[in-house]
Image (cartoon, rainbow, N blue to C red):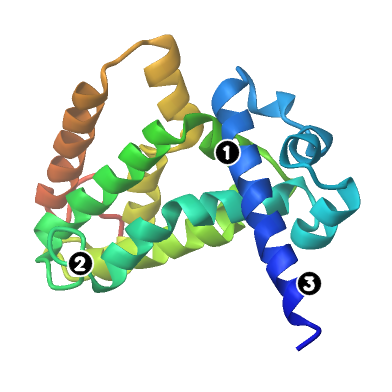
Amino acid sequence: MPERKPRKDAARNREAVLAAADALFARRESPEDVTMADVAAAAGVGKGTLFRAFGDRAGLLRALYEARMEPIRQTVETGPPPLGPATPPSDRVPALLDAVLCFKLDNRRLALALEEGGSSSPYRAEHYERWHSLLRAVLEQVPGLTDSGFTAHALLAATRADLVEHLAGEEHIPRERMRSQLANFVTSVLASGPSQGLNVEE
């Protein structure tokens, strides 16, 4: 019984921190401008509380990213078409890539901060491995594709946060045009035969 209050406080602090970080990333021009001290001050908690809860800045970014991604993850795992598991592969692959693109457009600075942060390879990040594994599994069901692993990497490369930031922020390409361009690219990949560029065999 005495443990309940600390647990409630910890949960409340966590929510306050995530909300504060979310707001800061939305307001600042550069993701690098947001520091752990900024987040702690905005959330009204000590820096020690922040580091205990999330470990470091990368841990905070991952937690915020996952909180934002949760509704999409649930739909992908158990939801209806076009994202859910009952969707035919030819429809599901474009829908999955579109969901990733829209998420990064809606969370541009957060996605950029997460993908640029840390010293390890971005391809080893948990969120990337999850999307790659999912796409690879779906692509394995597409007739004619002979290298689902490489193709999944190539498709995800079209949704990298730095590319999305460049296209949206510097080239000022409208959201719906970006979605259409990605859809056309994915369709061309899925329609290519075994001898085409992304279907690489040893």
**Residue 192 x %, y %:** 13, 48
At label 3, counting other C-alpha atoms closer than 10 Å, the crowd grade (few under 14, some 14-19, many 20 or more) is few
As shown in the figure, which amino acid type bears the numbered disc 3? Pro
Quadrant location of the N terminus in the rendered image: bottom right
**Residue 61 x %, y %:** 64, 47
- Observer-nearest residue: 192 or 20? 20
At label 2, counting other C-alpha atoms closer than 10 Å, the crowd grade (few under 14, some 14-19, many 20 or more) is some
SS at mark 1 in the image: helix
Sequence order check, earlier mark of 1 and 3 = 3
Tell me the residue that label 2 is attached to.
Answer: 84
Instruction: State left or right for residue 175 relative to residue 32.
Output: left
Whether 121 is drawn above or below 169: the answer is below
As shown in the figure, which amino acid type bears the numbered disc 1? Asp
Q: CA distance from mark 2 to mark 1?
A: 28 Å
Tell me the residue that label 3 is attached to.
Answer: 6
| Numbered mark located on residue 58 in the image | none
Q: CA distance from mark 2 to mark 3?
A: 38 Å
Q: Quadrant of residue 86?
A: bottom left
**Residue 193 x %, y %:** 12, 53
Sequence order check, earlier mark of 2 and 1 = 1
**Residue 77 x %, y %:** 30, 71
Tell me the residue that label 1 is attached to.
Answer: 22
